[in-house]
Amino acid sequence: MLERFFGLSTHKTNIRTEALAGLTTFLTMAYILVVNPFFLGELGGMDMGAVFVATALAAAIGTLLMGLLANYPIALAPGMGLNAYFTFYVVLGLGIPWEKALGAVFISGAIFFLLTLTKVREAIINSIPAGLKHAVSAGIGLFIAFIGLKNAGIIIADEATAVALTNDLGSPGVLLTIFGIIVTLFFLIKKVNGGIFYGMIITAIIGWIFGVVQTPEQIFSLPPSIEPTFLKLDLKGALDIGLFTIIFAFLFVDLFDTAGTLVGVANQANLLKDNKLPRAGKALFADSVATMAGAALGTSTVTSYIESSAGVAAGGRTGLTSVFTAIMFLVAVFFYPIVKAVAGVAAITSPALIIVGILMVSSLKEIDWKGLDEAVPAFLTMLMMPLTFSIATGISVGFIAYPLVKIFAGKSKEVHPIMYVLGILFVIKFIFL
């Protein structure tokens, strides 16, 4: 039955290979089960146990849909960067209740779903220049790396220079963070699948040995209650016009994160046909439904993970890989005692944020830095995210700058009309909101 449903022989794979690939993918992205509850729960004021369960369930739902509907070896989970934006800018920065923020996430997912059913999706994707897409990814990388350094106490506030390197590098927390970065980098440079996850585990063990991290009281337990966050989203409050930019930021990043990941992983697995992605609509459908389900459960935007490429490297070629990954996320809900002990420790979560940030910044190489009409908007987009502590502000500035510099360069016809509309909307937003 599995052979026929997933076309295993057609893709020259088997159940054992797909199972190993699914486990590999899970291990490479399991860090989200610790980082997401830390962001939304420990820092964002939500119930950490409920967020942990919501994270695991949303990942399982999205990944399972991707496997069964699109038959792709691609896993989904709450996106890095977007969870930081949700917590630090929307909830803590703007003071918006997390219930409204979840409502904004749900609405962005619903819009994504509607766009998937129409050709508008393709029009939007095609209207955004490649340089800005890569700049957004790089900017988010800088943003979450900065958050990691800040949370770990390595970078601190300074009246004279705004930020500075801490003068207390010998503190236990900072030393443990540095150790975590070194260990994780070692695994990644040695191309060990699951390097980020293993780095967190070893850092936690060292923290337990030296008394920096609280030892978990037990290993297994029944999952925490999801009631504190389940269906607590405020849709009516999220429709406030002031949340337009927030909804757009959630939608924009999810849209291009997913599109980029789908193409990249499918290309690695040799699944593209005539340079096009078969069943792309079903894959995007899985992503949009997962985002809405995640918001209902109590977590930020769910998106496709580039870490899925590790599973493909291990031989995964069909949706059965995703099915096995989804099963791993369901099993993970019984390991909350470990997550509870380490999720609130910045020295364990910060190395993961910094390393993921480094990986995301690699997209800078795709930008044409020789032409100022491409370099300026990309640079402003990337720079403004960490400096303003806002993904949305970076996107807004970049979308205003792009059509402007193209006009200056006498290349106004190269700009898609949608970009002009978005640029004007963002100018209005800065003036009136």
Image (spheres, rainbow, N blue to C red):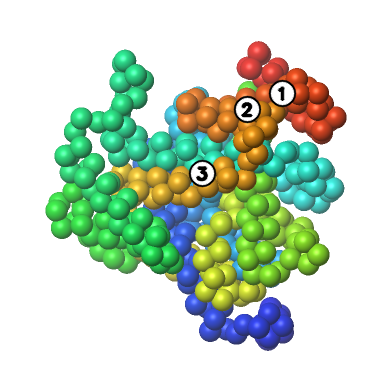
In the rendered structure, which disc, 1 or 2, sits on the residue that comes first in sequence? 2
Cα–Cα gap, marks 1 and 2:
8 Å
| Up/down of 165 relative to 230, above or below | above
Residue with the mark numbered 3? 361
Residue shown at 80% from the left, 47% from the top: 122
**Which amino acid does the dot numbered 3 rest on?**
Val
Element assignment for label 3: helix
Element assignment for label 1: helix
Element assignment for label 2: helix
Residue with the mark numbered 2? 376
In the rendered structure, which disc, 3 or 1, sits on the residue that comes first in sequence? 3
Looking at the image, residue 58 sits to the left or right of residue 176; the answer is right
**Which amino acid does the dot numbered 1 rest on?**
Val
Q: Please state the horizontal and vertical placement of residue 150, each as a whole percent of the image.
A: 34, 34
Residue with the mark numbered 1? 405
Q: Quadrant of residue 133?
A: top right
Looking at the image, residue 117 sits to the left or right of residue 198; the answer is right
Residue shown at 67% from the left, 46% from the top: 255
Q: Are marks 3 and 2 in contact (CB under 8 Å)?
A: no
Q: Are marks 1 and 2 in contact (CB under 8 Å)?
A: yes
